[in-house]
Every structure is written in structure tokens, then in C-alpha cells.
């Protein structure tokens, strides 16, 4: 009888039920969309932070102090220490290798450059002192398990714009900074004659200008060439001076800032199993012997701060949304009970107790909540997909957790919304209601 | 005629009043749904405007995003800027807030002085000294403090503060400097003593520097009245930053001539202040160069991307939430409106024209929408102030324009929600009274 009453109610007044369910599912769709987007936003945004460049820098531990002003190192030539390039594949073997998105070794040195005119075959124009930066453009790093990973300065510093083409690592090519190009009146496809006194022997090389580089920084006044060219000019085969690493990391909290040397074993384990930028730095230091890995604070800390803020903001917006959706849905549920006063009166007149009437209505509302909540979840997922794709190009992962939260919320809200009018209805005397008063 | 019209009107209002207040339960439900909708509209609209602005100020923790430097293609060795360029940029009225400080870089030899049981260093190490101008140092969040001396000792004693140095972590490790060590910095004949006030790790070139006040650096390097670079932080949206950069460049261009030389009075002042001969002052003056305002692309581009993403998420979330909230409220309201079938039937039975009945219901909806909107929007603005405080630590500024917008939206939603009643006016009163659908 109980089930028949419920079924009857749904089939006999489909439009009214449909409206309540529509309000419910729309409210739950809002909640689903907001929840899905805010659950996903952390991961998506931390990928966006890669556009700020590397957050870790590796230098030789035993290095002398660089005397760098405005991108020019004033140390005497060949002063300072180097790190072996052959160790670099080890970076992709650390525990956090999936978090390391890009890295690029740097070897810079002071050289003299002239424009070189091919038919004549002699350098023309005054020679200029300029910094030559050797690095990888996009270099395939071969791992021990035969897989390879393509990385380089193109990935590590995405704000580097090249007018023309990037140099080919296997050719004698280079990029020159816009300011250098302007002051030396150089253009793409010109040939540069580079001369460096490294150690004792003068070394020279001809480089074709593949493109003009604009970084908005000190590189605008420099030459960027394949790492191999720089190693040859510096007479330091297989060596580099500095390594920039971009790693996806978790914003640092107080625990992350502690010194790993002072931690207890279980704390150390927890620390090294969280992708804090400092624990990633620690694991890189362990595979690159003789290196010093430092966190680029302005990138790493700014990242953490902004990520935390945006995440809190979205959670609060989500919470406010849930609240408003709950209120609107509750109101709808309340309305659907209020309008049934006559029915309640009739049931009570026929001998139903307040409890039975309450159960009947609650069961009905719950059924409605599950149907409406389920529909709302589906609708919300579609919306979240649309929003996610529009903003990040990637839809957020549908999460079962959200479905659970939504169904519980829908049930709680409809029950709460109907509870108040139900209690009032229970107190009514059936007679005046049936008389229509 | 006039009497009938005024009688009609007073009847209209009486019916309206009665139908609004007749059923208190229903009134509460309607106000709850509309108020919740209005509250969330007002809160999100207010927060959205404010949050975008706040996010751009959060970008401060990335440090400087704009440099003012000597024109790079001047080909002038050791080009410097007049110190007044900094005052011109930082103090003037600017379209967006501009913070930052002037910097002077040079190389000096550093040596530890004997103090108590600590022996003096026997060797000097060349190191980059960086003079920081007054004003906002833009450094919070760009470094991690490794060691810090007792605050009181330095901040209360003006002399100590003047010659207190902030030592980069690489310098400290290399020379084994600790807080309270006294260093002697030497540049030719000139010597300055300073106490290590703090050791900081930046992860950038600042790690290799000894930071001091601009005045100390100018005296040590014998370059009074000059700076090598002005580091700026301009906050605002990417467009506003662009505009401010152009504005600053124009401001510098307008004052180009006065920045290329020192006035006679300044020259005497600087010479005495920096302990420099008038002839040396002429040489310094010859090195003054035109200034150029350049965005640091790494940060301006990265920030622009982040800003667009974050404001995209916010706008999309807010838009989706607002649309769905409106639909949800509308569904709830329609549900309430549908139960008024009996009233419509009765009104038609006693001779109400279709237009008048409809007008009555629309007026009721508009009235309720106005009431719900006024209450809800006020609550929403209070909520958004609280949300702003929770996320950014600063209360969101209430924007008055948000209030009328959310009230108007609520009224529109309420009227649209009453619209399905239009169908009810086609029903025959008799069938309603007979209880037929």
C-alpha cells in the first residue's frame, strides 16, 4: 500500500513532480559543477605556474662566488667549477621524476664576436665582447630503461620568443638576443665569427644565426648556442655550470620548511614522500654528486601563496554555492509539501497517524532527491567539462566522491526542507482542512 | 469613471496584500528561495570584482616585474642612471601603484674583521655588492631567511642599521659568515665595515651578493647620485601594467635632459656626500644614460597567463552558478505559483478578465522579488565581505553597483517564474472547482 501510494503520486501528477525534480537537479548541478572545478583547479593551476620558469637551480657545490652583474660574469675565464653533463639522465630516475617537467643545463662564457661575410671570408666590423650561453633547445635525454624524454630551455623557459627558428643542436647555429642584434646590425642567416680564449688555446667557430631571441631579460644582449658549442669554446667537454629544473610541487607549509637533518625517521619519510619543492631539491641533490640544489624562492613561494589563495577562494565560492542551492532546493521541497495539505488532511481523516504520513512523504522526497540529485550530477558534470575545457583545455576528472556528496546533500536538503511544513501539517486538525478552510 | 478606477485600484492592492500575506508558510518559502538567489548573486558579483584585483596584488610575491635600466644599445660601458629617475618614477602620480627600489651594483673585496675570539680572514674574496634604495624592497616571499640577528640591536641603532648587511647564502657558505660577524668591504682605497644582519637564500643571483643600503654602496663604489637599475613591481591586470609601463617611459622621456646631468648644486652635494673629487663627479656625469622601462617577460607573461586563467575560472564559475541559481529559483517559484490554480479559477468565475488576473499575479511576483532581492542582496554583500576577509585577509570592498543589479535580477527571475501562470488563465473555472485537473 505504502509503495502503491508513492508510485501513484509520481504517475498521477507528473508535471508537479517534474518541477520539484527540476529545481532539485538544477541546484545539484550547480553544486556538482562548482565542486568539480574547485577539486581540479589546484592541479591545473600548478601546471600553469610552469610558465614562470624553473623553480630549482643546480650549481656546483665547490664553485667560487660568481661575480655576476647584469648577466655578465666578471670572474676570470675558466674560473669556477663545473658539473658533468653525463649525470643529467639520473634526474629522471629520482622518486619525483614524474613531477620534473623540464630541465636545461647552462654553460656560459665571455667570447668575442664579429660579423662574418662569407664571400670575402674575413671577419668584418668591430669585435664585440658578448656572453655566449650554451644550452639545450630540445634535447632527447635517454633514460636507463631506454625510454627518452625531450627537454631543454624551450620547455624550461617558455617565455623565450624566437623570431626565426631555434638552433639545431647538431649544427653550427645560434640565436642572438634582440638588443645584440640591433646594436651589431645583425639579422637571421648572417654568420657570426666567435672567438674565445679558453685556458691557453684560442678557439674559434663560425655560427649561423638561426633566429633572434627576445626574453625581456639579460639574454637579449647575449648569444645562445648549443651546449656542445659552448663546451668546445670553453674547452670543457661534457660539462655545464648551472642547471634549471621545473618541478610540479606542493605549496610549502611549516612542516616543509624544517631542516630534513633534524627530523625523526618517520617524519623524514613523510617529508620526502610529499612533493614539496625542498624535498624534490633534496632528491635531486642525492643523484647529482657534487651539486648544490637551491630553490628559486621568488617562483616557488609566490606559486605556493597564490595557489593557496585561489584554492581557498574557490572552496568558499563552492561552499556559498552549495548553501544557496540547498536553500533554493529546500524551498522547493517545502512548497511541494505545503500544497499537499488537503491530501495530508484526508490521510489523517482516514486514520493514518502523523508518523505514517511523515514516512510516506519522506520516502517520496528521498526518491525525488535521488532522481533529481543523479540528474543534477550528470548535468553538473557536463557543465564542469564545458567550463574546464574552455579555461584549461582539459576537462576535470569526474569524481565519484562528488556524486556521493551530491546525493547526500540532495537527500539532506529535501528532507530538511520538508520537515518544517510536515511538522506543521501534522498538528493540523483534518476537519477544517478538508472543508477547505 | 474616475471613481471606478480608483476603487479598482484599491481593490487591486487589497487583493495583492491579501494574497501575499494569506499563507505565511508559502511567503517564507518564496522569500527563502528568492533571498538565497539574490544573496549568492550579490556575494559572487562583489567577490569576483574584488578577487581579480586582489590576485594581482598577490603577484607581489614574485618580486619585481619591471626594470628601469640604462638604454641597452647605447654601447656605453658602465652606463648608469641618475638617482632622481627613481624618485621620479616611485613618487609621481602613476596610473597603477608602482613600488620598488633603486639598485646599484659593483664589485668589492670582502674580508672578515677580527672580533673577540674570531680571527680576521687573511684573504679577500671578490663579491658583488648590491645597494638597495629606500622604499619598498619587494623582497617578501622572494627569499628564505637562513640566519637572522636580534632585531633590536640593529633596528634601534641608526648607525648599525646603516652599515648592516644582508648576506646572500652562497657568500655566507663560501666565507663561513654568520650573523653578527663584522665584514670589511674594500674597493681600492675605500673601505666600509658592516655587520652581518641577516643571511638569505634566494635561489637567484642575489645569493652571490652582499646587500646594503644604497648610500653605503654609493660611498663604497665612489658612484654617488647614481643607480644601475630600478626594480619595480607594478600591480594590475596585464593591460594596466602595459599602460603603466608606457606612462613611465613617457615620464622619463620628458625629463631626459635633466636626468642626463647633475645640477651644479647636486654635483657639489654628491661630491661631498660621496667623498668624491669634482673631477671624478664630471666623469660619473658622463656615464649617465637615458633610461628605458622594460617588462621582465618571465614574470609579466607568466603573470598575465595566470591572471587570465584565474579570472577565467572565477568568471566562469560565477556565470554558471548565477544562471543555474536563477533557473533553480525559477523552478522553485513556479512550483509555488502552480498551486494558485484555485485562486485563478475563482477570480475568473467572479468576472476577472484574463489581463487583470495576470497583472495581479505578476505584480505579486514582482513585489516578492523586490522584497527577497533587497534582503538577499544585503546579506550577500555582507557574506562577500566575510569571504574576502577569509581568503585575502582584507575585507572585500562592497561595490554599490552590485546591489541594484542583484535586486533587479531577482525581480526579473521572480516575474519570469510567475509566467507559467499565463497558461492557467485558459482553464475553465468550472473544471477547477470540480477538482478536475
Image (cartoon, rainbow, N blue to C red):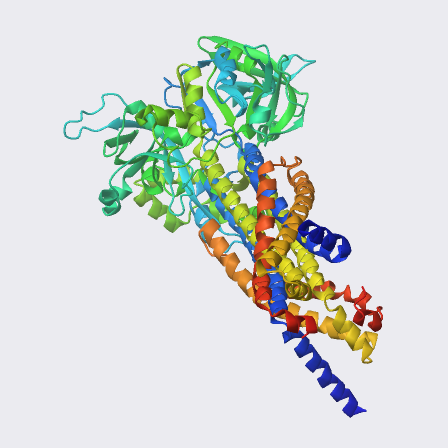
Horizontal side of residue B13 vs A290, given as left or right: right
Residue B101 occupies quadrant: top left
Q: Answer left or right for B105 relative to A320.
A: left
Whether residue B41 is visible here, answered yes or no, is: no
Question: Between residues B217 and A394, which one lies in front from this camera angle?
Answer: A394
**Residue occupying the point 61% across, 43% down:** B308
Q: Position of residue B58 (x, y in %)?
A: 49, 45
Q: Quadrant of residue A379?
A: top right
Residue at 78% x, 76% y is B346
Residue positioned most to the left? B116
Viewer-proximal residue among A329 and B267? A329
Percent position (x, y) of residue A295?
43, 29
Where B316 sits versus B171, above or below?
Answer: below
Residue ranking furthest to the front: A351
Front residue of this view, candidates B431 and A248: B431
At a point 76% along the width and 85% down the height, the residue shown is B8
- In this picture, is A358 found above or below A291? below
Give the quadrant of the C terminus of chain A.
Answer: bottom right
Total count of labels: 0
Residue B42 image offset from top left, x and y in percent: 59, 60
Of residue A89 and residue A43, the one placed in the foreground of this image is: A43
Provide residue A47's location: percent of width, then percent of height: 57, 33
- Observer able to see residue B236: yes
Q: Residue at x 63, y 65 (%)?
A: B30
Tell me: A133 left or right of A192: left
Amino acid at each position: 500500500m505504502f509503495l502503491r501510494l508513492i508510485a501513484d503520486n509520481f504517475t498521477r501528477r507528473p508535471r508537479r513532480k517534474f518541477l520539484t525534480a527540476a529545481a532539485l537537479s538544477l541546484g545539484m548541478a550547480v553544486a556538482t559543477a562548482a565542486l568539480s572545478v574547485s577539486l581540479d583547479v589546484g592541479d591545473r593551476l600548478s601546471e600553469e605556474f610552469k610558465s614562470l620558469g624553473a623553480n630549482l637551480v643546480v650549481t656546483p657545490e665547490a664553485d667560487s662566488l660568481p661575480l655576476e652583474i647584469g648577466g655578465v660574469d666578471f670572474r676570470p675565464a675558466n674560473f669556477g667549477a663545473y658539473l658533468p653533463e653525463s649525470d643529467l639522465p639520473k634526474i629522471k630516475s629520482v622518486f619525483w621524476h614524474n613531477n620534473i617537467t623540464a630541465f636545461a643545463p647552462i654553460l656560459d662564457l665571455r667570447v668575442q664576436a664579429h660579423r662574418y661575410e662569407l664571400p670575402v671570408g674575413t671577419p668584418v666590423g668591430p669585435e664585440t665582447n658578448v656572453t655566449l650561453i650554451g644550452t639545450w633547445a630540445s634535447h632527447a635525454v635517454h633514460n636507463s630503461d631506454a625510454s627518452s624524454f625531450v627537454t631543454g630551455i624551450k620547455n624550461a623557459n617558455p617565455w623565450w620568443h624566437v623570431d626565426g627558428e631555434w638552433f639545431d643542436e647538431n649544427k653550427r647555429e645560434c640565436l642572438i638576443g634582440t638588443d645584440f642584434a640591433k646594436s651589431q646590425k645583425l639579422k637571421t642567416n648572417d654568420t657570426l665569427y666567435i672567438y674565445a680564449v679558453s685556458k691557453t688555446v684560442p678557439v674559434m667557430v663560425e655560427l649561423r644565426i638561426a633566429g633572434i631571441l627576445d626574453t625581456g631579460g639579460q639574454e637579449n644582449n647575449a648569444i645562445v648556442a648549443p651546449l656542445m658549442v659552448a663546451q668546445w669554446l670553453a674547452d670543457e667537454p661534457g660539462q655545464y655550470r648551472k642547471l634549471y629544473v621545473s618541478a610540479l610541487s606542493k605549496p610549502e607549509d611549516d612542516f616543509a620548511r624544517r631542516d630534513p637533518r633534524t627530523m625523526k625517521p618517520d617524519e623524514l619519510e613523510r617529508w620526502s614522500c610529499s612533493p614539496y619543492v625542498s624535498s624534490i631539491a633534496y632528491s635531486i641533490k642525492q643523484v647529482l654528486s657534487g651539486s648544490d640544489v637551491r630553490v628559486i624562492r621568488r617562483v616557488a613561494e609566490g606559486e605556493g601563496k597564490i595557489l593557496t589563495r585561489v584554492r581557498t577562494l574557490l572552496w568558499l565560492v563552492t561552499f556559498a554555492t552549495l548553501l544557496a542551492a540547498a536553500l533554493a532546493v529546500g524551498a522547493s521541497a517545502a512548497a511541494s509539501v505545503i500544497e499537499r495539505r488537503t491530501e495530508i488532511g484526508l490521510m489523517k481523516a482516514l486514520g493514518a497517524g502523523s508518523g505514517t504520513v511523515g514516512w510516506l512523504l519522506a520516502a517520496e522526497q528521498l526518491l525525488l532527491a535521488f532522481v533529481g540529485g543523479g540528474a543534477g550530477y550528470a548535468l553538473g558534470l557536463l557543465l564542469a567539462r564545458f567550463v574546464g575545457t574552455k579555461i584549461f583545455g582539459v576537462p576535470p576528472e569526474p569524481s565519484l566522491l562528488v556524486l556521493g556528496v551530491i546525493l547526500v546533500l540532495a537527500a539532506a536538503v529535501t528532507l530538511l526542507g520538508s520537515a518544517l511544513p510536515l511538522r506543521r501539517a501534522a498538528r493540523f486538525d483534518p476537519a477544517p482542512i478538508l472543508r477547505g478552510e | 469613471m474616475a471613481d471606478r478606477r480608483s476603487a479598482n485600484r484599491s481593490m487591486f492592492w487589497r487583493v495583492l496584500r491579501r494574497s501575499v500575506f494569506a499563507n505565511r508558510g508559502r511567503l517564507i518559502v518564496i522569500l527563502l528561495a528568492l533571498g538565497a538567489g539574490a544573496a549568492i548573486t550579490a556575494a559572487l558579483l562583489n567577490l569576483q570584482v574584488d578577487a581579480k584585483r586582489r590576485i594581482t596584488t598577490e603577484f607581489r610575491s614574485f618580486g619585481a616585474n619591471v626594470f628601469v635600466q640604462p638604454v641597452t644599445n647605447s654601447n656605453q660601458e658602465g652606463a648608469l642612471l641618475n638617482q632622481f629617475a627613481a624618485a621620479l618614477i616611485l613618487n609621481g602620480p602613476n596610473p597603477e601603484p608602482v613600488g620598488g627600489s633603486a639598485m646599484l651594483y659593483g664589485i668589492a673585496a670582502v674580508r672578515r674583521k677580527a672580533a673577540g675570539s674570531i680571527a680576521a680572514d687573511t684573504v679577500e674574496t671578490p663579491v658583488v655588492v648590491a645597494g638597495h634604495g629606500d622604499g619598498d624592497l619587494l623582497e617578501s616571499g622572494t627569499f628564505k631567511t637562513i640566519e637572522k640577528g636580534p632585531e633590536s640591536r640593529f633596528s634601534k641603532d641608526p648607525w648599525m642599521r646603516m652599515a648592516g648587511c644582508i648576506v646572500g647564502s652562497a657568500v655566507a657558505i663560501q666565507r663561513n659568515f654568520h650573523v653578527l660577524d663584522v665584514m670589511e668591504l674594500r674597493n681600492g682605497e675605500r673601505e666600509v665595515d658592516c655587520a652581518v644582519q641577516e643571511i638569505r637564500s634566494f635561489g637567484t643571483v642575489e645569493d652571490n651578493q652582499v646587500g646594503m643600503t644604497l648610500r653605503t654602496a654609493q660611498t663604497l663604489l665612489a658612484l654617488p647620485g647614481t643607480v644601475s637599475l630600478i626594480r619595480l613591481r607594478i600591480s594590475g591586470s596585464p593591460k594596466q601594467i602595459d599602460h603603466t609601463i608606457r606612462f613611465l617611459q613617457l615620464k622619463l622621456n620628458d625629463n631626459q635632459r635633466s636626468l642626463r646631468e647633475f645640477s651644479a648644486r647636486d654635483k657639489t652635494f654628491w661630491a661631498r656626500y660621496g667623498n668624491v673629487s669634482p673631477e671624478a663627479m664630471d666623469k660619473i656625469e658622463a656615464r649617465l644614460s637615458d633610461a628605458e622601462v622594460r617588462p621582465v617577460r618571465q614574470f609579466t607573461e607568466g603573470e598575465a597567463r595566470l591572471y587570465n586563467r584565474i579570472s577565467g575560472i572565477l568568471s566562469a564559475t560565477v556565470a554558471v552558478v548565477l544562471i543555474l541559481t536563477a533557473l533553480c529559483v525559477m523552478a522553485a517559484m513556479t512550483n509555488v505559483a502552480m498551486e494558485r490554480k484555485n485562486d485563478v479559477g475563482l477570480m475568473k468565475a467572479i468576472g476577472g478578465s484574463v489581463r487583470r488576473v495576470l497583472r495581479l499575479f505578476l505584480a505579486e511576483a514582482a513585489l516578492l522579488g523586490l522584497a527577497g532581492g533587497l534582503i538577499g542582496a544585503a546579506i550577500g554583500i555582507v557574506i562577500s565581505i566575510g569571504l574576502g576577509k577569509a581568503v585575502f585577509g582584507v575585507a572585500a570592498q562592497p561595490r554599490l553597483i552590485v546591489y541594484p543589479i542583484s535586486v533587479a535580477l531577482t525581480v526579473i527571475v521572480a516575474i519570469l517564474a510567475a509566467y507559467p501562470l499565463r497558461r492557467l488563465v485558459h482553464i475553465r473555472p468550472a473544471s477547477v472547482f470540480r477538482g478536475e485537473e
